[in-house]
Amino acid sequence: MLEMDAKPKLNLPPPFDEAMRRHEGEILRFILRTSGDRDEALDLFQETWLRAYRSYRQLDSAEGLRPWLFRIASNLCLNRKRDRARRAKVIADVELHEEDAGAVWPMHDSALHLKSILRRLPNKQRQALVMRKLGGLDYGEIAAALGCSEEAARAGVYLAMKKLKAE
């Protein structure tokens, strides 16, 4: 006997607080690794969730939640990096020289060396690598978060790994 009243199951996103609990750790780790500064990362983390909250009703399905959150975080990190670059042009040369002096210290710690190498990677490659290796995202999710194709996401991770191995 067929049931005519059977409703199709909607794959709606979970309530916002549940989504936040489920993804806050990996989003914070991604932002920390992308920004390299704890205070800045905490600020970007809060802004990520604020923007997600404001737009949450527009999200269509649960499948798109994780890449959507990474895209928000990624865009905020890019914006912050651009803002920092603009401000650096205005800052006095004395302050810029102070920042360069900190780079003279030898980097014996491999984590510091890795952090330094990651900073030199092109932004999309760095973000794709962090999302894949540290965030555990698949290439489809990375592509959605970065606004590119799966092939471009895969290539970004590959090229970043190639550059890391060359260092």
Image: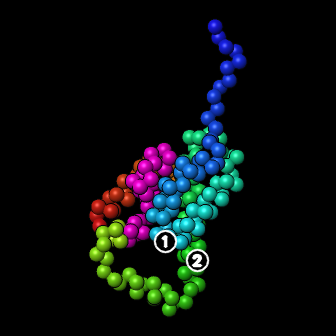
> How far across and how far down the image is residue 147, in percent?
55, 52
Instruction: Identify whether 42 is placed above or below 58.
Output: below
- The local secondary structure at tag 1 comes to loop
Task: Determine which quarter of the picture holds residue 3.
Answer: top right
Q: How many labels does the image show?
A: 2
Is 92 left or right of 129, judged from the image as shown?
Answer: right
Point out the tag, 1 or 2, that comes first from the N-terminus.
Answer: 1
> How far across and how far down the image is residue 59, in percent?
65, 45
Q: Give the magenta part as a residue range.
A: 115-142
Is 138 left or right of 58, judged from the image as shown?
Answer: left
Seen at 58% across and 65% down, the residue is: 44
Task: Determine which quarter of the picture holds residue 74.
Answer: bottom right
Q: Which amino acid does label 2 sit on?
A: Arg
Is 87 left or right of 116, judged from the image as shown?
Answer: right
Q: Residue 113 carries which label?
A: none
> How far across and how far down the image is residue 149, in percent?
50, 47
Give the residue number, with chain letter if any, for mark 2. Answer: 86
Q: Which mark is residue 37?
A: 1
The colour scheme used to paint the residues is: rainbow
Is residue 131 part of the magenta span, yes or no? yes
Seen at 54% across and 81% down, the residue is: 88
Q: Can residue 11 be seen in this view?
A: yes
Q: Magenta residues: mostly which secondary structure?
A: helix
Is residue 120 part of the magenta span, yes or no? yes
Q: Can residue 123 be seen in this view?
A: no
Seen at 34% across and 57% down, the residue is: 161
Instruction: Identify whether 145 is placed above or below 13.
Output: below
